Amino acid sequence: MPDGMLSLADTAVGAVLLGAGALSWAGRRGSRVGPLMAMAGACWFLGSAFPGLVFLHRGPLVQLHLSYPIGRLHRWPARGVALAGYGAALYEGFVPAPWLTVGLSALVVAAALDVFARTSGPARRAGRSALAAALVFAAALALGSANVLLEWGADRAVLLVYDTAVCLVVIWLTVDLRYGRWTEATVAELVTQLGRRTDIEGLQGQLARALGDPGLILGYRVPGRQAYCDETGRPLDIAQGAAGRVTTVVEDGGEPVAVLIHEPAVLSDPQLLHGAIAALRLTVANARMRAEVRARMAELATARRRIVEAADAQRRALEAELTTGAQTHLAQALRHLRALEAETDEEGRAVLPQVLAEVVAAQRELAQFAQGVRPPSLTAGGLGAALPLLADRAGLAVSVSVDVGRLPPPIEAATYFVCAEALTNVAKHAAATRATMEVVAEAGTVVVRVSDDGRGGADSNGSGLRGIADRVEALGGSITVGDGAAGGTLLTARIPAEGAASNEDHERGTSDEDRDRRRLDADPRRPGTPARGGRLRGGGDRRQHHHPDARA
């Protein structure tokens, strides 16, 4: 074949690539296929001028075949093969490596099959052209390498076959892009992308790219009003739209939910526009549904908090009634019985001690019951007064540190009962000899830490802890139970409390976990380790280091 004919064929291929790129860009501005074809054409002519760049056009062509018809690579295998295509094209331009081209053609086939296998429905029908074009291009690459490796000596014929294959593939893809399944692929990709969204931020940009209109404006209907706003929440006057643009209202169930302001050219592809509107309608509906779910969850959390607060108010009322009512009557009855002790006869004096003992026992049982409902010390003096008394009844050495002032009654009660349940578990199950309780305020949150030197392995799903956890969670808090750094168990509860503040917070600037571990390392059960103290209701900064076994 004459050299002049090969030169003419070479020029024709470059012209076809440039022309196909221009046509594709003009017809489908939302796709990057056109620019990739044009880039391949430019690289083709660069290779004609500079021999070292003779294979550079392969990079854009590999990317074209793996990203058609959208022009964007979404899978990592395809991205890796596209990068390999550019690298191999540059390398082989200076160092002959036919085996490298064989490997590249195999990678192109594998990546094309992977992309096609990951599609379904309309996108798969649109991807058939891309797969066929990629296989033809890979075969042309492999044919050229085989001619060199097997020494066929058919350089001119193979070159003509390669040029013809590139031209036919590019023309085929250009026609398919304008009249084929590109719209279905675009809509399928848009629906897939929007289906992953949990909000509507950035939705306007995605629609603008899909419809090929960079100036597209998306407005959302303001609930309960005949008005729209843009993505930033600013009012959008659709009655005074930009000159030369078209307004399309998006409805869901006959009710306007959004509006698109776009170029008239978007109407030239009604299938694409209708698909984009359907995807937009679905996304807005999903966003509304998620917003409703969040609102209902917030209402549920508020209702749970109200239940806890109401129950605590009932506890306080019952405790006050027991203290001022039944306990007062029992005390009066006890005084009257003792007054009668000197006036009664021998038979009465024989029975009276038993009656007095029963009244005293009733007083004790009633006081214990009132303590379980809500300790009077908690009502009168807050956590600083109630927790040391709780430690007195724990049955083991307990160090108490309280560094908060008075808190709202529901939060004080929740904090107290967290400590009470934790100490009960320590006494029953931990086989511990010492424990520590610490209550501090950190950044508007009351933090409770209870640790022990027992065997560890506490079950956070036990009935007692589960009930306390429900109470804490109803107040917006959380409880975690785990093994301490030096053994034993560490229970940490965090309860939001607006206005709560430590008198001394030396732990600012460190993480919660670091503070937990540091305080566990400073556990009073370790020899020579002092306990932190706290401000109590009576005023002043009284440090507490409370050990029941050393009360004497």
Image (cartoon, helix red, strand yellow):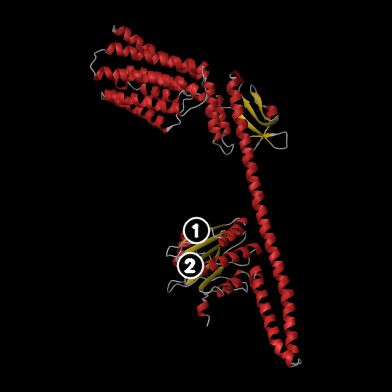
First in sequence, mark 2 or 1: give its number. Answer: 2
Three-letter code, disc 2: Ala
For label 1, the SS is helix
Decide: few, some or many residues near mark 2? Use Cα within 10 Å; few <14, some 14-19, many ≥20: some
Does 483 appear above or below 532?
A: above
Question: Which of the two marks, 2 or 1, is nearer to us in this view?
Answer: 2
- How many tags in the picture? 2
Does 382 appear above or below 352?
A: above
Q: Residue at x 54, y 23 (%)?
A: 184
58 to the left or right of 194 = left
Q: Which residue is mark 2?
A: 430
For label 2, the SS is helix
Locate residue 220: give its quadrant: top right
Q: Residue at x 72, y 80 (%)?
A: 331
Does 199 appear above or below 37?
A: below
Q: Is residue 160 visible?
A: yes
Q: Is residue 446 visible?
A: no
Three-letter code, disc 1: Asp
Locate residue 62: give its quadrant: top left
Decide: few, some or many residues near mark 1? Use Cα within 10 Å; few <14, some 14-19, many ≥20: few
Q: Locate residue 393, reporting x and y percent.
A: 56, 74
Q: Which residue is mark 1?
A: 512
Image quadrant where one finds the N terminus: top left
**Considering depth in this image, is 450 or 2 the residue closer to the camera?**
450
CA distance separating discs 2 and 1: 24 Å
Q: Locate residue 484, reporting x and y percent.
A: 45, 63
**Considering depth in this image, is 147 or 319 the residue closer to the camera?**
319
200 to the left or right of 224 = left
Indicate which disc residue 482 carries. none
